[in-house]
Image (spheres, rainbow, N blue to C red):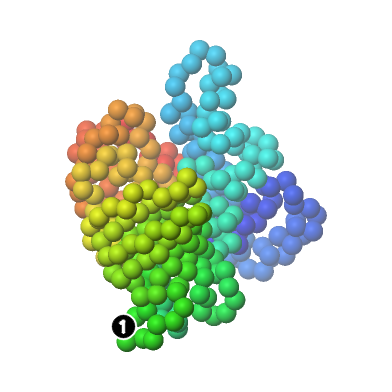
Amino acid sequence: MIAARRWVIRLRSGEAGRDDVEALGRWRAESLAHHRAFALANAQWSMLRQAAINVATAQAPAVRKPARAVLTRRAWIGGALAASVGGAAYLAVRPPLELWPSLSELNADYRTEIGERRQIDFSNNVSVEMNTRTSLRALDAGVNPQVLNLVGGEIAVTTGKTGAALGQPFVIVAGTGRVSATQAMFDLRRDGQDVAVTCLDGGVKIECGQETATLKAGQHVSYSAQGFGAIVATDGRAVDAWRKGLLVFDNQPLAQVISEINRYRRGRIVLTSASIGHLPLDATFRLDRIDEVVPKLAHLFGLKVRTLPGGVVLLS
């Protein structure tokens, strides 16, 4: 399916030539599975594009001039969706509502799909567990890389396993920083250029620009292009609850809760009213029952539910 999506992105980028079209024809002819995968990927692209437009229409404030309303909606979703060749290319890099993987995610060495978790054990005494929608790229050669790039998503890393000889620090590049550890357990999450690090055991060193921070067990810090945030104490059990198949929320705003839930389900849940986004929620959800979340939230907060193509759900 990934190959089919790449073909769709290529053909809609405006850069495809006759050789690409002929190559696609050969690829589709290889098997019925290829033929069906391309048809499905093409249909998904069209459907998700329309879903994004529908969401933007619902979110855009009413204005008197229709032309201005269209511009507002387009700006909200990052440009004219497939209204031009450039729009299609933009969607390949920055998918609207994160409805499908970006090119950088598709080209990663290690990836997890929506709702998938994956563990990678390296012989250099390093274990990396990947959460949903996570992409990693190896930055050095070899079967057991010592330096990884977290393109996006979340990982739990264990370095220097008990009884093993300690070697060089294991390094992960994430956003504008580098995280390294010799013997530790830590959680690392990247959303765009925002990165969060939580040390669960041992010690972790983080470098960002000219600054350096060191974490010990039970500490958390965030960083971005602007530098470090404050180092704070945190409950590691809530941070890595995903490893046990759970999502734990402790008095968190509904908007933040929905943003987190969106990482684990296909499509997108959208709050159409900012006034309810601040409402607090204490809850624990099972990841293997993520589809039960929408009706539960609707019941708890008295929300109306509207379902759109592509798994998009509007809550108001």
- Is 282 drawn above or below residue 25 in the view shown? above
Q: Nearer the viewer, residue 126 or 113?
A: 126
Q: Nearer the viewer, residue 143 or 26?
A: 143
Number of marks present in the image shown: 1
Residue at the spot 41% in from the left edge and 50% down from the top edge:
228
Residue at the spot 59% in from the left edge and 76% down from the top edge:
141
- Is 256 drawn above or below residue 130 in the view shown? above
Q: Secondary structure at mark 1?
A: loop
Side (left or right) of 217 relative to 102? left
Name the quarter where the N terminus is drawn: bottom right
Side (left or right) of 179 relative to 44? left
x and y percentages locating residue 71 in the rendered image: 57, 25
Which residue reaches farthest top? 64
Residue 81, quarter of picture: top right
x and y percentages locating residue 35 in the rendered image: 62, 61
What residue is shown with label 1?
162
- Is 125 drawn above or below residue 194 in the view shown? below
x and y percentages locating residue 300 in the rendered image: 19, 39
Q: Residues within 10 Å of mark 1 (few under 14, many from 20)?
A: few
What residue type is disc 1 on?
Answer: Thr
Residue at the spot 58% in from the left edge and 73% down from the top edge:
140
Asked if one can make out residue 263 in the rendered structure from this viewpoint, the answer is: no
Side (left or right) of 289 relative to 128? left
Name the quarter where the C terminus is drawn: top left
Residue at the spot 27% in from the left edge and 39% down from the top edge:
253
Q: Nearer the viewer, residue 264 or 192?
A: 192
Asked if one can make out residue 62 in the rendered structure from this viewpoint, the answer is: yes
Which residue reaches farthest right? 18
